[in-house]
Image (spheres, helix red, strand yellow):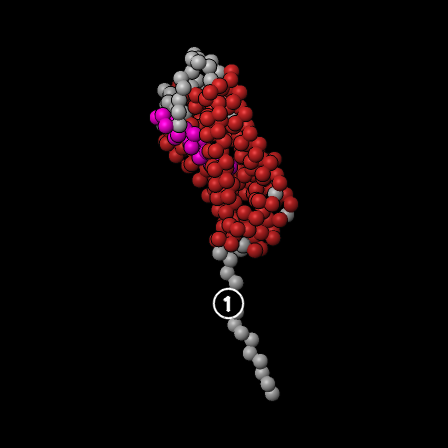
Amino acid sequence: MTTFSVPNRPAYRLTARGVLAGEWTKFATLRSTWITTGVSAVLVIAFGLIAAMVGRAGMGSDAVSLALSGTTLAALAVGVLGVLLSAGEYSTGMIRATLTAVPARTPVLWSKALIAGGTTVVVMTVAAVLAFTIGSPLLDSGVATLGVGDAGVLRALVGAGLYLGLVAVLGVALGVLLRSSAGSIAVLAGGLLILPGLMMLLPGSLAETVSPYLPSNAGSAVMALHTSDGSLGPWAGLAVFTAYVTAALVAAAYRLKKADA
């Protein structure tokens, strides 16, 4: 009797690189992600140019702050990008297939955060530099002319990309944590846009103490050319905002590991 031996095949092992490649494929093949990314870049450039054309001396603005006028709305757009990348899978049910392929679960979260954050940092930094470069010749003659090589300018422009990249990561974390696109976007918008306005209702001294540590105020400090009284320094502010994002990621990772999809 003749016997046939079956060659031993190495067990399939999904690597972190494989998970990252899979998540990139999802990101790159979704039309909504590129539309949202493009809208974010257009907001930064368009609002920067508009601010440069209408900005006047004596308004308390400089060339950098005018160029970055669109970052507030862009933050909401890139945050939505992060939410769609994560919570979108819960609404379609694709998350079950994803977690079946990646039983460890958390590599999915890290990959989504890296892709959303990394893509946003690159695109938004380029948009900020373009807004500054194209808008500078349009400035009012009373606004001091600045170049990329001047003190603080490059840090502020790159800082805009870093801040918006972290906002995108925050969107990913909220999407996994809340598992609802609408709920995640509402929390994101409330934390970045509405909460600073509510601080106006607090007594003056308390508002001045708390306000610099709010997520949007702390994160945007890295984009300021000069540190104003009562505000955090550029890198201190970015560190505070990074702590918020890290806390959201840790909470999202915990729920991803412990709760059913």
Instruction: Give the residue drawn at x 50%, y 24%.
Output: 48
Residue 119, percent from left and from top: 50, 40
163 part of magenta stretch: yes
Instruction: Give the residue drawn at x 51%, y 50%.
Output: 20
Residue closer to the observer: 54 or 168: 54
Q: Which kind of residue does numbered mark 1 sit on?
A: Pro
71 relative to 180 in the view: left or right: left
**Residue at the outermost left position:** 151
What is the chief secondary structure element of the magenta stretch?
Answer: helix
Q: Report the magenta residues as a range.
A: 149-168
Query: Mark 1 Cα within 10 Å, few/some/many (few <14, many 20+)?
Result: few
The residue that mark 1 highlights is 10
Residue 116, percent from left and from top: 51, 41
Q: Number of labelled discs?
A: 1
Instruction: Give the residue drawn at x 55%, y 51%.
Output: 22
Instruction: Give the residue drawn at x 62%, y 49%.
Output: 94
Residue 121, percent from left and from top: 47, 37
